[in-house]
Amino acid sequence: MFARAGRSTLLFVMILLTMLACCATAVSGEGSGLREQSEILLRSHDAGMRLEEADLVWVPQSENSGSLFVPFRKQFTVDEPIVSAGVFVAADRGVTVYVNGTQLGFVKQKLLVSMNDYPGVRWMAGEYFDITELVREGQNTFGARVASTVVGGKSEGGLLAQIVLHGADGSVTRISSDGSFDVCGSNIFTTGWTLPPDMGGDDAGQTWVKASVYAPGWERIIAFGRRASGEVDYTLITSLWKDTGNVTTLDASEESTMDGFVTADGAKLMLNGKEYRAIGVNVPHLHSAYNGTWHHISQIYGNAENAKEAMVAAIIDAHRNKVAFIRFFANPGYPVDAEKLYFKDRDEYWRQMDEVFDLCRAHNIRLIPCLGVVSGWFYICGEPKQALLDPNSKTYNATYNYVEEFVTRYKDDPVVLMWELENEAFLAADVNMQGRSGLGAGQFPAGSPYVKPTLTLEDSLTFDMTLQVYKEWTSIIKSLDPNHLVTSGDAHVRDTSESLRRYFPGQVWILDSLDQHVANYIESQTEPLDVFSIHAYGPQPSARWPGHVSTTDYYTSLVRAAHSKPAPVFIGELGNGGPSFGEDPEAAWTRSFIDAMEQEGVSLMALWVWHFPWQPMNTLDGFSHPKLMQQVKEFNEKYAGY
C-alpha cells in the first residue's frame, strides 16, 4: 500500500464492541481507530444461506395502491424436527419482520444492492435473524412489513429474503423470495389495516396476491462496516456476488491492486509501458457531498447521511459500468462550506477525503482532483482575485497551504490520474469583472466582513496573468509531486479571445478567426503543463464557433493543434448541449463525438455529469443512457485494461 504523508498506522486491534458483537468483526485502519467489518452476509452464508437464489420482489403494478407500508408473507410447512433455522431480510428504507406472529425487530442495517437494470443501485435495510426457537412443526408464517417510497401514486421498493431450515436428519431447506411470496397492495391507511392474524395481528380481511419478481435481477449485495462511534465505515466492504454466491471482504484503506503513474509521451499517455486512453465521468461534488459540506445538501439530499450514501452509490455505479476515472472539484467550497469542516476539524476533513480516495481505489477508479487554485481562496481571504499573483498575500499563502496539503498527501497514490489546476479559468481571461456578481452573504459564515456581492476590476485576470498563474502553480505542484501529470482544467479560450486580449480593460467582443483562436488556445496551455484541456458540448450552431465550422470540426481543430505540439488531450467535460442528456436518452451527438475523438487519438474524455441531481437535465447514471454507457465500457475495455 502507498504511504500517505502525515498519517500513522495504528496497531492491529482485535476487540469486539459489545453493542456490535452480533454483527461485526474488528479490524484496524490507518488513523481511524477501532473499525468493525459487517458480518451480516458472512453470518447468513455460514448459516447455510445461498442468497444468490433469492429474487427481488414487490407488489404487482396492477395491485399497487401507493401504500406507505407493504406487507409480505410466506407460509411454509415443516414436516420433520429441525436443529436450527434463520432468516435474512432486506428491503427498501426499513422492514419489520415477523415469524409466527412474533415480531423480530425493525431492520435498519444499510445494504447497497447493485442492480442489473434501473435504478442501477438501491439502498436497502437488512438483517439476519436466528429463528430456531420460533419455527414449529406444521404450518409456519414468515411476515415482513416493508416501508416504501410513494412516487406518482405508486409504492416503490423491494424485498429480498431467504429462510434456511436445518433438519435433524442433516437436510437443508431454503425458502427464497420469489413469485410464490404473498403481498398485499391495499392502502393500509384507508382500510384500517393493522396486521393479519398469522403476522401477530387481528385483521383477517386483507386480500393477498402473488408478488412480482424484478426480472433483470441483481448483481451484488454490499454491506458496510462501522467505526467505534457507530458511524458507518464505507471503506469496510463485504460483498455477496450473485453469479458465484461467494462472499468477499475488503478493507479499502489497506487493499489495492492499482499501481503505476500515467506519463506523457508526445501526444500519448502511457501507463505501465502501454498507451493509456480512457473515458471517465464528472462528479463535481464528490468529496463535498461525501463529507457533508456541499452547499446544496439540504435542498438536494435532505441531510448529510443521504448525501454520503449518494456518493457511495455513484462510485459503485461507476464501477459496474467500467468507468475509468472521476473528475471532481476538490477545494473546500464556498467560505461558509469551508468553515463547516476544513477550518473546524482539519484532520476529519482529510480523513473523509481519504475515504473517497480509498473507495475509488478499491473499485479501480482513478481520480482527477480539480484543485481550484484560481477561484478557491480569494473570497475566503477577503482579497481581490489578483492577490493570487502576490506571494505575500493571504490568498497566495492559503492557496499554497491547501495545495501543499493535498498534493503531498496523495503524491505517491496511483489513484490520482493527474492534477488539475482550475475549472475553465481562461473563459474569464480578459473579461472585466467590474460590477459583475460575486458571492452574497449566504455563501459566507454569519457576520463575515468579506461578503462580496459585486466584483471589481482587481478581480479580473488578463490572458498574461492567467498564464503566470498556470506556470507558477504547475511548477509548485511538480516540485511537490514528481509522479503525476498536471492539466489546466480549461474549456478553451473565449471565441472572442483576440479582441478581448487586445482591448482589455475595454470589452470588445469580435469573433476570432479560426487561426487566431487556435493560436490563443495553444498559447493558453503553457509549459510546464503536461496535458491540454478542452471542454466539449454540442451540437451548437456553426455561427457560434470561430470560422463558422461545425461543433465537431471546431473541437477537432483544437485537438489536432494540441497533438502537433505534441501534447496529449483531456476532454474534461463532454456532454450534449442541445438537446441535453435529459432530452435525448440516445445521447446521439455525444456518442458520435466519442467516435470522432477516438479516431483523433484523444487520450481522456469525461462525461458531464454523473449522479448530479443539481443539474437534472444533464445528469447520467448507469441506466439512463444505455447506448452511451455501453460505448464507455467498450472504449475502456479496449484502451484502459478493463
Image (cartoon, rainbow, N blue to C red):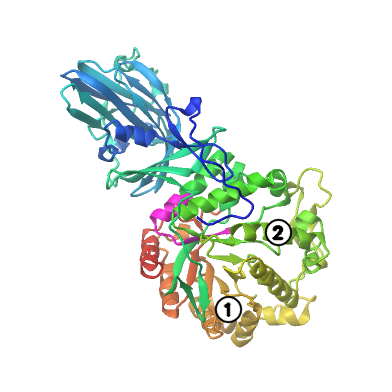
Residue at 47% across, 75% down: 602
Residue at 44% across, 54% down: 363
Specify the amino acid type for callout 1.
Answer: Trp
Span colored in magenta: 314-328
Residue 254, percent from left and from top? 49, 49
Comparing 63 with 499, the one in front is 499
- As helix, strand or loop, the secondary structure at mark 1 comes to loop
Question: Which residue is labeled 1 in the image?
Answer: 545
Q: Is residue 302 shown to the viewer in this render? A: no
Residue 595, percent from left and from top? 40, 74
Image-quadrant location for residue 139: top left
Residue 313, percent from left and from top? 46, 47
Q: Is residue 327 magenta?
A: yes
Q: Is residue 15 shown to the viewer in this render? A: yes
Q: Mark 2: few, some, or many residues within 10 Å (few <14, many ≥20)?
A: many
Residue at 43% across, 71% down: 594
Image-quadrant location for residue 144: top left
**311 w.r.t. 597: above or below:** above
Q: Earlier in the sequence, mark 1 or mark 2?
A: 2
Question: Which residue is labeled 2 in the image?
Answer: 376
Residue 401, percent from left and from top? 72, 58
Could you tell whether 444 is left or right of 357 in the image?
right
Which callout, 1 or 2, points to the residue nearer the camera? 2
Specify the amino acid type for callout 2.
Answer: Gly
Q: Are marks 1 and 2 in contact (CB under 8 Å)?
A: no
Residue at 25% across, 35% down: 178
